[in-house]
Image: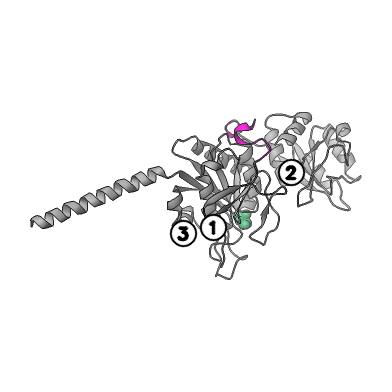
Amino acid sequence: MKHHRLLARCAIAATTLFAALSTAWAADKPNVVILATGGTIAGAGADASKSATYQAAKVPVDKLIAGLPTLSAVAQVRGEQVFQIASESFTNEHLLTLGKRVAQLLKQSDVDGVVVTHGTDTLEETAYFLNLVIHSDKPVVVVGSMRPGTAMSADGMLNLFNAVNVAASQDAHGKGVLVTMNDEINSGRDVSKMINIKTEAFKSPWGPLGMVVEGKNYWFRLPAKRHTINSEFDIEKIETLPAVDIAYGHGNVSDTAYRAFAGQGAKAIIHTGTGNGSVSNRVVPALRELRSQGVQIIRSSHVNAGGFVLRNAEQPDDQYDWVVAHDLNPQKARILAAVALTKTQDSKELQRIFWEY
Ligand code: DAS
């Protein structure tokens, strides 16, 4: 009998020791929160052959985490389902709600990094928005996938594993909001979806910042523009974002869209120009008239490998009091214009902001 009692005592001691160790290990692991918003990374198709035909925003965040048992070796991970939508349906209100939750979490001492799972359609807009307004140097990593988890060669699991790795990494601090897709680490400012049918969909015109390989980050560049803690914009001081619309320039274009947007109250119009942000002579008079009525006119380009709009090159911006979007694509120019207009209506200040962010 004595023998059994001894064995029982040893078993209890071993269990207690393991429990203590596992808590200690967990305490050693960085704490990463995954904020889930929907998209393909939470998508589901009818069968494994469906890599492009599926329903986005179906799988809840806890199932995404459970599908990645290796995460526990990287970090203590917990999830919150902020939204469950396809990202083409994001609104300014979604951006503000998400941004405020990210900021709130990063202020907590028991949160070391945040991952945002997101649809790929507007992922670049959300990543840039957070890059502008989150005042923390802790890693924020936005991640999506081009194929649903139900498809052969689905990319979501590795993208999410990489995102948690980066969010848990000391060396990811102070690099602004990051995007991990297809083994690359891109700046949330630069990256955009360049093609909609490949897993290598996301590219930065000026190249990625680094790569993640087998859970290790390899860095090659650092962001050059202002972001996060060096930004003059703060999500905690933004309650609404002004209406900024995007009008597309092309051959045979008319000024109808520009006038309609202004008529609906747009505070700024992003002109998506051909080439160097060029404006058709059929549209210039309307833009000059709208500018005189107080609407900001911002010239961007639809050159998709990365436009680079130069002031006073294709149009006399000084004379017309217009702004150029520098290398920002139209959808990112909309984000920056909306954030900037929460602080200034001055076109010269807007231009400074477009050079610096
Ligand atoms: N509809 C797309 C979206 O939610 C699906 C995706 O690619 O994530 O952005």
| Picture coordinates of residue 264, whole percent (x, y) | 75, 41
The residue under label 2 is 328
Q: CA distance from mark 1 to mark 3?
A: 11 Å
- Please indicate whether residue 100 sits to the left or right of residue 272 in the image: left
| Picture coordinates of residue 267, whole percent (x, y) | 74, 36
The N terminus, quarter of image:
bottom left
Residue 203 in the image: above or below residue 266: below
Mark 3 residue type? Gly
Magenta residues span: 223-236
Of labels 1 and 3, earlier in sequence is 3
The residue under label 1 is 158
The quadrant where ligand 1 appears is: bottom right
The residue under label 3 is 67
Q: Quadrant of residue 288?
A: top right
Which dot marks residue 260? none
Q: Secondary structure at mark 3?
A: loop
Residue 314 located within the stretch drawn in magenta: no
Residue 353 in the image: above or below residue 86: above
The C terminus, quarter of image:
top right
